[in-house]
Image: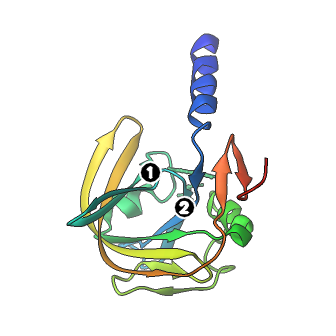
Amino acid sequence: MAAQENGKIALRQALGAFATGVTIVTAIAAETGEPVGFTANSFTSVSLDPPLLLVCLAHTAASYRAFREADSFAVNVLAADQEETAMLFATRGADKFGATNWHPGGMGAPLIEGCLARFDCAMHQRVTAGDHDILMGRVIGFSRHEGEALLYHGGAFQRLGQG
Ligand SMILES: Cc1cc2nc3c(=O)[nH]c(=O)nc-3n(C[C@H](O)[C@H](O)[C@H](O)COP(=O)(O)O)c2cc1C
């Protein structure tokens, strides 16, 4: 059992060698009408025609059920000065939206202020893959702003040009 756990930690560390940006994925919970969201670095562009992207969500996330039932979601790409927001949305049970400037996008999902890019998506496909679901979105609208990106590498937030 301990060996299995050690193997998982080693795998996670190896996967962390891949540098990524950082996003916050949001939706509105159908049941309560409340916004939900989580920090994610599993974001990937998939297709330009049609425009598709994906993100992976753990089955253990508090927001899992809301995303399972949602017919739309948004991906907010974080800027270098949004590390605190990234930590907030990675904290289960935190008041995520009370402390964040946001407004609903065209599809209803929250768009966060100050991001480098925001993608408003219709849920295209959901695929269960091990202990995560792959959420594939069809981009209905997007915006982009100049600025430095927040990065994640080796289990820590980074900025471009930092060791
Ligand atoms: C940099 C970073 C990247 C993350 N990427 C993902 C991810 O891609 N998918 C995921 O399910 N959780 C990811 N997490 C963990 C979630 O943000 C965290 O479990 C969060 O509490 C989930 O929110 P919820 O439980 O309130 O729904 C990441 C956390 C950090 C700090």
Q: CA distance from mark 2 to mark 1?
A: 9 Å
Write the residue at 47% across / 76% down.
118
Disc 2 Cβ-to-ligand 1 distance below 8 Å: yes
First in sequence: mark 2 or mark 1?
Answer: 2
88 w.r.t. 11: above or below: below
Q: Position of residue 5 (x, y in %)?
A: 61, 20
Q: Are marks 2 and 1 in contact (CB under 8 Å)?
A: yes
- Some atom of ligand 1 lies within 8 Å of the CB belonging to the residue at label 1: yes
Q: Is residue 139 shown left or right of residue 81?
A: left
Residue 38: image tag: 2
> The disc labelled 2 sits on which kind of residue?
Phe
| Residue 145 seen in the figure | yes
Q: Secondary structure at mark 1?
A: strand
Mark 2 nearby-residue class (10 Å; few <14, some 14–19, many ≥20): many
Amino acid type, residue under disc 1 in the picture: Leu
For residue 57, the mark is 1
Give x and y (percent) for residue 11. 57, 26
Seen as rendered, the residue at the extreme right is 163
User: If the image is split into quadrants, where does the N terminus sit?
Assistant: top right
101 vs 76, nearest the viewer: 76
Looking at this view, is 108 or 154 the one in front? Answer: 154
Residue drawn at (33%, 72%) of the image = 121
Q: Which mark is residue 128?
A: none
